[in-house]
Structures are given as structure tokens and as C-alpha cells.
Image (cartoon, helix red, strand yellow):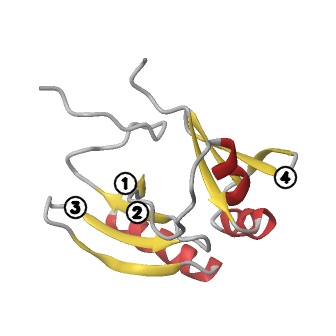
């Protein structure tokens, strides 16, 4: 198995409402097929699909609530962290961690989308972004 993630599919209660939320963040839909919404996110896809259908497709029990995973969106400055968090707030997100300095010398905040998926927005000087937005581990 190659060491990469191709697609993150978020199980949502209302695909249309979640689509509107992500569009309010500034995301553009790349494809909308059979009640499934696809966003191009750098070199991968983020997909919105009905939560019950996603669970059934994977043969999973859906206990609801937080699934033990947080998505992260790294940015280039503390000001950008603040802007993204405020954009998310205006789009209807719940802010669970106000932007603040972190233990690793960065700056971050967290919002939760309408379906409970947490997003950390972070500026991490130890993991700078390339011009194209990709992130990598430092050499060594």
C-alpha cells in the first residue's frame, strides 16, 4: 500500500446543507453525482455523502458523535488562521477552540462543521507550506 490518502469522505446528515456550508468557506464543487459532492483539495478529494449510506457502504455501525479524528488545514500566517476561523463562524461553524499560540510554537484554532467534523486551522512554522499549498516533513 502506498503511503498516501486519496479521498476523505465526510458522512453528513444533509448533503445540500453541508455543500452550502463548504461553499460558504470558499470551496468550489468539482463534481456532484447521485447526491454525492466532490471537492478538489490539493492533490486529494474531499467528498460529502449521506452519513447512513456511508456507514452501510462500509459495513459499519454509526455510533454518531466525534469519531476520534480531526481534519487539519494549514495556512501561512496567524492572521490567516484568524480569517479562516471567522469565515467558518460566519458560515455557521461552531468554534471549539479559539485561535491561540500552540505548545509547538505555532498558532491554531478549531471549528466544527454542521455535522460535527472538527477542522484545525493552523500555522505551524515547523511545517511550512510550499507555494502550491502542499505540506511535507522537514528533512532529517
Q: Residue at x 49, y 68 (%)?
A: 84
Q: Which residue is mark 3?
A: 106
Count neighbours of disc 4 (C-alpha within 10 A) and say few if under 14, some if 14 to 19, many if 20 or more.
few
Q: Nearer the viewer, residue 77 or 48?
A: 48
Is disc 1 in contact with disc 4, using a CB cutoff of under 8 Å? Answer: no
Count neighbours of disc 3 (C-alpha within 10 A) and say few if under 14, some if 14 to 19, many if 20 or more.
some
Q: Which mark is residue 6?
A: none
> Quadrant where the C terminus lies?
top left
- What is the number of callouts on the image? 4
Q: Which residue is mark 1?
A: 76
Q: Which residue is mark 2?
A: 121
Count neighbours of disc 2 (C-alpha within 10 A) and say few if under 14, some if 14 to 19, many if 20 or more.
many
Q: CA distance from mark 4 to mark 3?
A: 38 Å
Q: CA distance from mark 2 to mark 1?
A: 10 Å
Query: In the rendered view, does 114 fall on the left or right side of 128?
Result: right
- Tell us which disc is closer to us: 4 or 3: 4
Tell me where residue 83 appears, x and y as whole percent.
48, 72
Q: CA distance from mark 1 to mark 4?
A: 34 Å
Q: CA distance from mark 2 to mark 3?
A: 11 Å
Q: Say what secondary structure mark 3 lies in.
A: loop
Amino acid at each position: 500500500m502506498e503511503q498516501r490518502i486519496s479521498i476523505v469522505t465526510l458522512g453528513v446528515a444533509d448533503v445540500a446543507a453541508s455543500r452550502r456550508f463548504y461553499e460558504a468557506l470558499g470551496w468550489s464543487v468539482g463534481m456532484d453525482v447521485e447526491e454525492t459532492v466532490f471537492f478538489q483539495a490539493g492533490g486529494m478529494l474531499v467528498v460529502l455523502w449521506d452519513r447512513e449510506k456511508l456507514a452501510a457502504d462500509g459495513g459499519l455501525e454509526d455510533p454518531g458523535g466525534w469519531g476520534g479524528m480531526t481534519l487539519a488545514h494549514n495556512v501561512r500566517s496567524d492572521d490567516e488562521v484568524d480569517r479562516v476561523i471567522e469565515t467558518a463562524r460566519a458560515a455557521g461553524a461552531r468554534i471549539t477552540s479559539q485561535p491561540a499560540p500552540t505548545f509547538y510554537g505555532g498558532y491554531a484554532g478549531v471549528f466544527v462543521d454542521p455535522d460535527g467534523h472538527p477542522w484545525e486551522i493552523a500555522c505551524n512554522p515547523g511545517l511550512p507550506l510550499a507555494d502550491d499549498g502542499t505540506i511535507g516533513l522537514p528533512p532529517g
